[in-house]
Amino acid sequence: MVSGLINENPIVYEKKERRVRAESSNTDELSAEPIDQLEIFDILFLLSLLYIGSFVSPEHFTHHIRDIKDPEHPYSLEELKVVTEDSVEVDDDKSYVRVTFTPTVEHCSMATIIGLCVRVKLLRSLPARYKIDIRVAPGTHATEDAVNKQLNDKERVAAALENPNLVEMVDECLLPSFE
């Protein structure tokens, strides 16, 4: 966590109840399953195991995008309403995912880190065919355009991920909380 909090007293909301997905009628383990809004919001930490040939049942999946920790507070992005299920857009046919997040304050200095955490989580979890678009909700941040440009520029993201301090902060935010 960071010292000198930007938002010392954020509003903390209750987490939504996790929904159990219905069993797929598709028995072919090698066929591609469609990805939807709920799956992105509840994106699973061990999903990558499916792409290296191992089958893992859904009950083994433990970490979700909704559980990414805020870099400043001991709360999840869901608890702070930075990310909601409604803020996720998915077009599986076009392999496109957009996550729009809402910082807790207009001058949040952690907005880029939060967006980077969401991007890294999706990059690590989704098949490479997906285009990922991370955005700050319109009108919710003082430097919205600059943050959006930084989060969606592949070279800037790659440079950020070469910084060991940033990678450590991102990895800390992505650690499972086991709640």
Image (cartoon, rainbow, N blue to C red):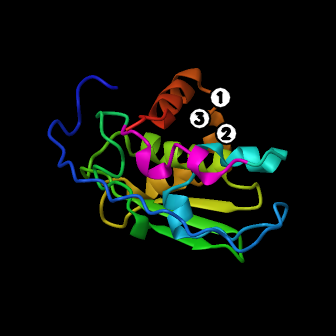
Question: Which residue occupies 74% across, 44% down?
Answer: 49
Amino acid found under the numbered disc labelled 1: Glu
Residue occupied by mark 3: 160
Q: Which residues are magenta?
A: 56-70
Q: Residues within 10 Å of mark 1 (few under 14, many from 20)?
A: few
Tell me which corner region of the image, top left, top right, bottom left or bottom right, holds residue 6: top left
- The reply to whether dot 3 and dot 2 touch (C-beta < 8 Å) is yes
Disc 2 from disc 1: Cα separation = 6 Å
Q: How many marks?
A: 3
Q: Secondary structure at mark 3?
A: helix
Residue 72, compared with residue 44, is above or below; it is above
Hey, which residue is sitting farthest left in the picture? 9
Residue 119 drawn in magenta? no
**Residue 134 visible in the picture:** no
Where is residue 59 drawn, in percent x and y?
A: 57, 49
Residue occupied by mark 2: 158
- The reply to whether dot 2 and dot 1 touch (C-beta < 8 Å) is yes
Q: Secondary structure at mark 1?
A: loop
Residue occupied by mark 1: 162
Residue 59 drawn in magenta? yes
- The reply to whether dot 3 and dot 1 touch (C-beta < 8 Å) is yes
Question: Which residue occupies 53% across, 30% down?
Answer: 171
Disc 3 from disc 1: Cα separation = 5 Å
Q: Secondary structure at mark 2?
A: helix
Residue 50, compared with residue 31, is above or below; it is above
Where is residue 100 drawn, in percent x and y?
A: 44, 62
Where is residue 162 drawn, in percent x and y?
A: 65, 28
Where is residue 65 drawn, in percent x and y?
A: 49, 50
Amino acid found under the numbered disc labelled 2: Ala
Amino acid found under the numbered disc labelled 3: Ala
